[in-house]
Image: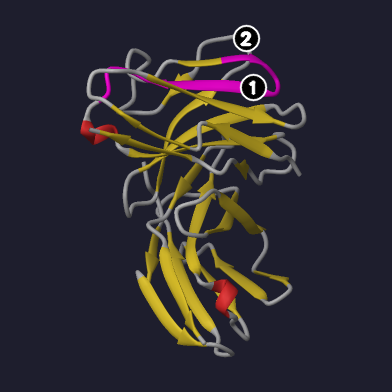
Amino acid sequence: SAVISQKPSRDICQRGTSLTIQCQVDSQVTMMFWYRQQPGQSLTLIATANQGSEATYESGFVIDKFPISRPNLTFSTLTVSNMSPEDSSIYLCSAGNGIVNEQFFGPGTRLTVL
Amino acid sequence: SQQGEEDPQALSIQEGENATMNCSYKTSINNLQWYRQNSGRGLVHLILIRSNEREKHSGRLRVTLDTSKKSSSLLITASRAADTASYFCATESNDYKLSFGAGTTVTVRA
């Protein structure tokens, strides 16, 4: 199994600003993903963070709004850009090794945009 | 996009009772997984059942999968207050990406 930490755990931000969320895994993993969970809702996949190349975004999510970095096999960042109150959500990263299909999740970052 | 639908949306049971929740999905899958989330925190992986399996057990958890009906169920036996959480099913197709259901909120009363 993998242990995943996220920073920050929560933040309150002003409209129009950007926030970068960090995700750190305690071991090298093949796959890292970013999800959004809006209040009272289920998880929606934002993108797959690819090591050494551009992230792969799901329908409805674009790089300009959610730029993602993955410089190595243990670390990724998600930036929420030009925030609006509609971006208030929990953002979670997950990791998997591509062999066993289960994913391990970080504790999430609770974002409130005023 | 979300593939799974779960029912019920919410479930309230007495400690010691069993809790059953169901998940339906739309497309073919490699496996189906169940996760637990406590109070808006991160998800904890509970159990994975592959498309060629019909039933799987892990402690007090029992999962069934019926690929002909595209449905799965999660049974928690002898529930405890600590089982109070939201439970999500997630399907995985061919690219390791998970598609989550809407979730079932379970409350276990002491």
Camera-nearest label, 2 or 1: 1
Read off the residue under disc 2: A52
Q: Position of residue B21 (x, y in %)?
A: 47, 73
Q: Is B17 rendered above or below residue A58?
A: below
Percent x, y of residue B16: 59, 90
For the point 34% across and 25% down, the residue is A61
Q: Is residue A87 left or right of residue B62?
A: left
Which quadrant of the figure contains the C terminus of chain A? top left
Residue in the image at 45% along x and 50% along y: B100
Circles 2 and 1: CB distance less than 8 Å? no
* Main SS, magenta residues: strand
Mark 2 chain: A
For residue A75, the mark is: 1
Residue B103 on image: x %, y %: 41, 61
In what element is the residue under mark 1?
strand
The front one of A74 and B31 is A74
Q: Which amino acid, by three-letter code, is at mark 2?
A: Gly
Q: What x and y, as percent, mark residue B51? A: 62, 56
- Tell me if A74 is positioned left or right of B6 in this view: right
Q: CA distance from mark 2 to mark 1?
A: 11 Å
Q: Which span of residues is magenta-colored? A: A70-83
Q: Residue at x 34, y 18 (%)?
A: A18
